[in-house]
């Protein structure tokens, strides 16, 4: 028993692995506890914090990035330290954390993507949308990639908000993007892009689409872009009509789609074609490169749980295209010495308490938040109540928690291992550098996209 944990005499020591929204909201929920004294250390693979707020949110959605002010305030607290440029499983191991922290929170997100599982998916020109997102947002892992933007038509598979983001970025005016913090390499490539049409393929109908109203409304407001919808796709089956009556988001979506269908072509230079009840069944190509996608028309059938599922009708057509971006969901990847549910791509847990996949028993002192906990769903704000729910479990466990030993401070350990950990003050040096470059161009920032360049700027400014 360790009833004294969380007091001034023995503050609770918490490690948070991952400094994205879910990690910050976990810290916020802990720091909000009036009677709890805790010390929080963040560990983050990249030198830069904020996770998907920096590397996922589309560059033309700058206002969403204002949440980082809240994260900065949290990180400035005397009870919080940030260790960026530290890879869990390489610079720092599970056992290192166990020896030093009473509780560990995994906030590692979902670092990979789901596949469609169709022939030709690996041809050149067929890529995950998540990688395209990382590329235009200046994620160091993707900054050297090249996308075949010398084609006229791109196919985007999926009807979620990521599909909406990548579609918008492909057809919007680069002059607009030039006002944002889009990565310079992406801006240059998009300026030279020959893409004139993006075909979005939704495997189910408009009522079942996962995208939300503001994103669909934005399509209709893009200058120089026609949004084309086949009115026949908006003839709903009886069950879709019934579910529409109970779903306000779907009602607004369908209303907007009807407006687009009625507007039709205006002769704009670029276009978005939104097709529904259409599944890619094969990526076709020649000499290792994709050239077209074979698409099957679907119908909707009610599953046992009442949801409407797509079923192929055996009617096919082929769409020529130079690139296909699959946007069918993110997927978590395992991290060393931490339980992993390969089917869900998450860290197995019960209400945020990590569990063993073999025995289902709770792993004492280990917790999970965000996409690693519930899978890749929800907006940034969803992570706030999600993290608070996990923190409630952490607090409930305190009286029974064995206190960690007094191993040497993690900063000493990292230094001994030769890791050049980035503090929050270090990040602010890089932040100021990026902001100054941006100010000179009338942009929020110009992102540094390589870790070695980030570290050189930080070392110079320390
Ligand atoms: P998502 O919302 O789960 O959408 C995934 C889409 O892929 C769905 O339309 C799904 O269709 C489709 N899909 C899955 N498997 C497929 C297959 N084999 N063939 C064809 N289509 C398939 O995921 P996401 O777009 O990656 O977004 C992740 C989360 O981040 C979401 O909660 C999203 O709202 C959020 N986000 C928000 C914003 C924003 O607020 N602006 C921006 C980006 C992301 P079914 O419905 O038929 O399964």
Image: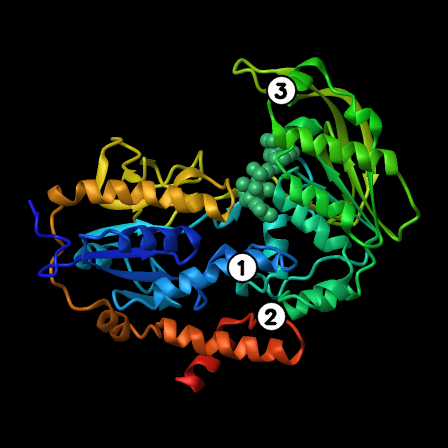
Out of 268 and 204, give the one closest to the viewer.
268
| Residue pictured at 73% horizontal, 69% vertical | 188
Residue placed furthest toward the front: 34
| Label 3: element kind | helix
Residue that badge 1 annotates? 65
Q: Sequence-wise, which precedes: disc 1 or disc 2?
A: 1
- Between 101 and 228, the residue placed more toward the observer is 228
Residue 444: mark in rendering: 2
| Mark-to-mark CA distance, 3 and 2 | 42 Å
Residue lying at 41% horizontally and 40% vertically, measured from the top left: 346
- Tell me which label, 3 or 1, sits earlier in the chain: 1
Mark 1 and mark 2: Cα distance apart in space: 11 Å
**Residue 116 in view of the camera:** no
Query: Which residue extends farthest right?
Result: 267
Q: Position of residue 5 (x, y in %)?
A: 12, 52
Q: Say left or right for 344 vs 419.
A: right
Instruction: Indicate yes or no: mark 1 CB to ligand 1 under 8 Å.
Output: no
Local crowd size for mark 2, using a 10 Å CA cut-off: few (<14), some (14–19), many (≥20): some
**Ligand 1 is found in which quarter of the picture?**
top right
* Above or below, comparing residue 86 to residue 274 in the picture: below
Q: State yes or no: discs 1 and 2 in contact (Cβ < 8 Å).
A: yes
The answer to whether the residue bearing label 3 lies less than 8 angstroms from the nearest atom of ligand 1 is no
- The disc placed on residue 243 is 3
Where's the C terminus, which quadrant? bottom left
Residue visible at 45% across and 63% down?
Answer: 69
Where residue 214 appears, as percent x and y from the top left, is 66, 44
Q: Residue at x 93, y 48 (%)?
A: 267
60 on left or right of 73: right
The image's mark for residue 117 is none
């Amino acid at each position: 028993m360790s009833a004294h944990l969380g007091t001034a005499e023995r503050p609770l020591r918490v490690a948070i692995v991952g400094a994205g929204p879910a990690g910050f909201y976990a810290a916020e929920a802990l720091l909000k506890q009036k009677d709890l004294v805790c010390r929080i250390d963040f560990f983050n693979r990249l030198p830069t914090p904020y996770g998907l707020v920096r590397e996922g949110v589309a560059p033309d959605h700058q206002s969403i990035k204002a949440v980082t002010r809240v994260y900065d305030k949290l990180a400035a607290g005397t009870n919080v330290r940030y260790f960026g440029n530290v890879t869990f499983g390489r610079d720092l191991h599970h056992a290192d954390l166990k020896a030093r922290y009473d509780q560990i929170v995994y906030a590692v997100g979902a670092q990979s993507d789901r596949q469609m599982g169709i022939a030709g998916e690996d041809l050149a020109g067929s890529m995950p949308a998540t990688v395209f997102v990382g590329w235009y947002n200046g994620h160091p892992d993707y900054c050297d990639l090249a996308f075949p933007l010398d084609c006229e038509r791109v196919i985007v598979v999926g009807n979620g908000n990521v599909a909406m983001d990548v579609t918008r970025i492909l057809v919007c005016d680069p002059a607009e993007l030039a006002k944002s913090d889009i990565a310079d390499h992406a801006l240059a490539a998009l300026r030279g892009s020959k893409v004139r049409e993006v075909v979005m393929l939704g495997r189910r109908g408009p009522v079942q689409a996962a995208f939300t109203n503001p994103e669909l409304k934005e399509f209709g407001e893009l200058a120089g872009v026609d949004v084309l919808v086949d009115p026949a796709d908006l003839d709903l089956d009886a069950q879709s009509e019934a579910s529409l009556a109970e779903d306000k988001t779907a009602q607004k979506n369908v209303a907007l789609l009807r407006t687009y269908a009625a507007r039709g072509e205006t002769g704009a230079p670029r276009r978005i074609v939104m097709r529904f009840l259409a599944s890619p069944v094969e990526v076709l190509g020649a000499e290792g490169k994709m050239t077209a996608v074979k698409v099957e028309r679907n119908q909707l059938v009610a599953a046992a749980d009442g949801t409407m599922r797509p079923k192929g009708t055996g009617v096919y057509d082929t769409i020529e295209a130079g690139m296909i971006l699959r946007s069918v969901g993110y997927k978590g990847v395992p991290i060393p010495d931490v339980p992993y549910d390969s089917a869900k791509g998450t860290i197995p847990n019960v209400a945020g308490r990590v569990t063993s996949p073999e025995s289902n028993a709770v792993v004492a002192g280990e917790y999970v938040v965000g996409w690693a906990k519930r899978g890749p769903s929800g907006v940034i704000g969803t992570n706030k109540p999600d993290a608070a729910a996990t923190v409630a479990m952490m607090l409930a466990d305190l009286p029974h928690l064995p206190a960690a030993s007094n191993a040497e401070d993690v900063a000493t350990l990292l230094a001994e291992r030769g890791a050049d950990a980035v503090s929050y003050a270090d990040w602010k040096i890089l932040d100021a550098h990026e902001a100054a470059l941006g100010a000179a161009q009338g942009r929020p920032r110009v992102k540094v996209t390589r870790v070695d360049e980030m570290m050189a700027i930080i070392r110079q400014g320390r």
